[in-house]
Image: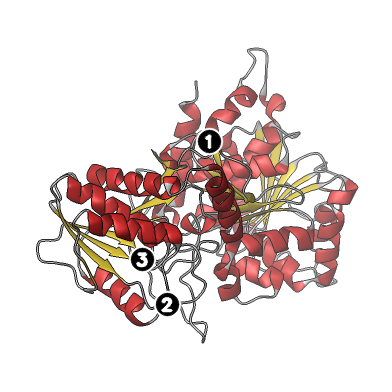
């Protein structure tokens, strides 16, 4: 058993359908009831580990195998002399065979099983074994009442496999018939069994799941078909690429050009440029769309100002790594006559990180979308870094639709524009044509502030300039993981300029 986000590695994610197929295959290879026996024992062990002081435990079980796991755990905990109260909401249908076995063995052991929907007096831990991954719609009736009672109790909660009411694939509360979000358990711990579900790691999953633990029940890991969870260890992948020869010079580490910073938004471009510099790019140029910033200079004396005027061939830029859009306002609008550099950038830039107002401009222009789609077939590489609203504009979807299934939204956007995408947010999603989706496990609410996205865009470009042959999907995964890791332990709120220094400190800590 592991606390998965504290481990180094990439872990396969399974959709609900994939989970069921994996479970069926495991059951076919295992003796009868063995898998449920292992699962229930794992729940009991984790309960003892996370609440070693607890003498009174309330276990709320549903009518499926999730409830069966809870009954097995109840039997083990009661056998250790703990005061165990079991509420079982079995309904009128017969229990599945394994769950019936768990019921029978629990009652044979002397456990009293009731239907109370309230935590007993003195309760110190609740085990939520109410609803599993098969849930597709909002819990109703006594199930909703049980979830409300669990959440109202003020008692720490350990959920089995998923917090009851959370959709396994999307990380959203399961909706009711009117598409309204239903009730979801707020757990402090979740023990994911057999396979990892993407909904635990993106959307609202992390808020509902708390600390996420994983026990594969002895079933070997396979490709889940729904992508991979990116846990720790990504930054170390940079180590081999980051070694600097004694004979190297600034020209050895590439150049970045940041285009953005319209009037009143100069800070966004400055943050991106400063971030690219901290990431290790040899030279970083800033072409600010605001004349005020061009004239006044910057607080980072190492940054180089790009000549004013049109982006043309007089100063070569076609071999540089570009960051375009941070605080650009309407300075990139492709309306004829405004002299926007964006069309030529889309036609020629070999490596392009498109963010913020660059994305908004593309969303308004059919021509820009066509140019963007043509880049990969022309050997040019592109990375988009939208937040949910920017992704919604590019897809012409409501924001709620993007957030309702973040993995699907990232896949569709990557396919539609034929490029790599980092859909930012809780559990940022990285999607690229022909690659498995990655869900980033690092980061926290310290990143929920102005300018942190500009820092990510600049950092990605800074890494890319140093390793121009690195596959975009790998670059995006590395950069997002690094960005999130820098927020761990940071003071909240974390100011974006300070985030750059946190990221730079992590670079300095590499062996």
Residue 302 appears in the rendering: no
Secondary structure beneath dot 3 equals loop
Residue 197 percent coordinates (x, y)? 52, 54
Q: Are marks 2 and 1 in contact (CB under 8 Å)?
A: no
Q: Which residue is mark 1?
A: 9
Q: Earlier in the sequence, mark 2 or mark 3?
A: 3
User: Residue visible at 48% across and 47% down?
Assistant: 194
Q: Earlier in the sequence, mark 2 or mark 1?
A: 1
> In the picture provided, is 206 more to the left or to the right than 305?
left
Q: Earlier in the sequence, mark 3 or mark 1?
A: 1
- Which of 353/65 is in front? 65
Give the alpha-carbon distance from disc 2 to disc 3, as whole Å: 15 Å
210 in relation to 412, above or below = above
Depth check, front residue: 89 or 15: 89
CB atoms of marks 3 and 1 within 8 Å: no
Figure check: 73 above or below 163: above
Which residue corresponds to mark 3?
Answer: 130
> Secondary structure under badge 1?
loop
Determine crowd level at label 2: few under 14, some 14-19, many 20+ residues with C-alpha closer than 10 A: some
């Amino acid at each position: 058993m592991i606390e998965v986000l504290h481990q180094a590695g990439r872990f396969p994610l399974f959709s609900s359908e994939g989970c069921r197929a994996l479970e069926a295959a495991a059951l076919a290879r295992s003796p009868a009831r063995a898998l449920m026996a292992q699962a229930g024992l794992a729940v009991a062990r984790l309960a003892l580990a996370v609440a070693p002081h607890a003498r009174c435990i309330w276990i709320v079980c549903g009518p499926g195998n999730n409830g069966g796991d809870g009954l097995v755990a109840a039997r083990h905990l009661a056998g250790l002399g703990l005061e165990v109260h079991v509420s079982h909401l079995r309904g009128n249908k017969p229990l599945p065979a394994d769950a019936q076995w768990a019921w029978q063995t629990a009652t044979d052991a002397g456990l009293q099983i009731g239907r109370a929907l309230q935590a007993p007096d003195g309760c110190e831990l609740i085990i939520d074994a109410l609803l599993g991954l098969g849930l597709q719609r909002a819990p109703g009736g006594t199930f909703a009442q049980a979830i409300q009672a669990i959440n109202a109790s003020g008692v720490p909660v350990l959920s089995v496999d998923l917090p009851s009411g959370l959709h396994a694939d999307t990380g959203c509360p399961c909706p009711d018939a009117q598409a309204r979000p239903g009730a979801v358990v707020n757990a402090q711990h979740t023990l994911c069994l057999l396979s990892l579900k993407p909904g635990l790691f993106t959307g609202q999953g992390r808020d509902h799941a708390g600390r996420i633990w994983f026990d594969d029940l002895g079933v070997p890991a396979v490709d889940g078909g729904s992508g991979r969870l990116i846990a720790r260890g990504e930054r170390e992948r940079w180590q081999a690429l980051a070694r600097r020869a004694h004979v190297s010079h600034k020209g050895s580490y590439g150049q970045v050009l940041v285009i953005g910073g319209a009037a009143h938004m100069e800070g966004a471009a400055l943050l991106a440029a400063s971030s690219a510099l901290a990431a290790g790019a040899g030279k970083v140029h800033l072409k600010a769309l605001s004349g005020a910033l061009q004239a006044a200079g910057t607080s980072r004396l190492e940054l180089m100002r790009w000549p004013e005027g049109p982006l043309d061939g007089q100063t070569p830029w076609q071999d540089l790594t570009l960051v375009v859009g941070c605080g650009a306002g309407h300075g990139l609008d492709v309306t004829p006559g405004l002299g926007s550099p964006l069309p030529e950038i889309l036609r020629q830039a070999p490596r392009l990180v498109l963010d913020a107002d660059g994305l908004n401009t593309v969303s308004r222009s059919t021509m820009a979308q066509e140019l963007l789609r043509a880049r990969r077939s022309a050997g040019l590489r592109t990375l988009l870094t939208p937040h949910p609203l920017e992704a919604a504009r590019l897809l012409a979807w409501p924001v709620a639709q993007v957030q309702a299934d973040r993995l699907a939204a990232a896949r569709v956007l990557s396919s539609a524009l034929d490029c790599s995408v980092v859909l930012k947010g809780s559990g940022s999603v990285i999607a690229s044509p022909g690659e498995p989706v990655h869900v980033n496990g690092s980061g926290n609410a310290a990143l929920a502030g102005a300018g942190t996205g500009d820092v990510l865009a600049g950092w990605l470009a800074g890494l890319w300039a140093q390793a121009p042959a690195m596959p975009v999907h790998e670059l995006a995964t590395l950069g997002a993981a690094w960005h999130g890791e820098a927020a761990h332990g940071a003071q909240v709120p974390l100011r974006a300029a300070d985030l750059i220094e946190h990221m730079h400190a992590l670079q300095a800590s590499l062996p």
